[in-house]
Image (spheres, rainbow, N blue to C red):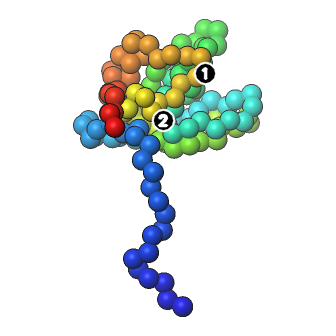
Amino acid sequence: MAKHLNHAVDEMVPDKLIAGMTPPLQTASGTIAKLSAVATYKRGTVLAKSAKDNTLCILGTTAASGDTLTPDCILCDDTEVGTEAGTTAAVYVMGRFNVDALTVADSYTMTEADKDKLRERGIYLAQVWD
């Protein structure tokens, strides 16, 4: 039985994470620090970089003693983070993103200083209206 070339394979549901085409999206890879319990970070999670070991953690995490966490990038895809070792993930390091589609740690609100640090890295935030 032959398959037709014009059948639907899947359906796309826009998540409104991307807010514009300038500056162009740029991706890289980063290592998310291991966790005490397995968790899945969702696409659009804002990640902060550790000054101590360059690993990434969700923005709003409390820094370890003697460490500084700086807002750095945005997670490209849902990623399961384990407990044994750091997890390598694709991250956006440049682009324009919908501030309302971003995720940070529970009970944390992104500050203007956080937004400034992201902007210094080439990540611009905007609101997307329906």
The three-letter code of the residue at mark 1 reads Asp
User: According to the image, label 1 marks what residue?
Assistant: 106
SS at mark 2 in the image: loop
Q: Is residue 62 above or below residue 25?
A: above
Quarter placement of the N terminus: bottom right
Neighbourhood count class around disc 2 (C-alpha, 10 Å): few under 14, some 14–19, many 20 upward: many
Does the image show residue 77?
yes
* Residue 119 located left or right of residue 15: left
Neighbourhood count class around disc 1 (C-alpha, 10 Å): few under 14, some 14–19, many 20 upward: few
For the view shown, which residue lies furthest in the front direction? 130
Distance CA(mark 1)–CA(mark 2): 14 Å
Q: Where residue 62 appears, x then y in whole percent? A: 61, 14
Q: Where residue 91 appears, x then y in whole percent? A: 46, 38
* Residue 124 located left or right of residue 53: left
Does the image show residue 50?
no
Name the residue located 40 percent from the left edge and 40 percent from the top edge: 16
Q: Is residue 15 above or below residue 8?
A: above
Quarter placement of the C terminus: top left
User: According to the image, label 2 marks what residue?
Assistant: 44
For the view shown, which residue lies furthest in the top direction? 66
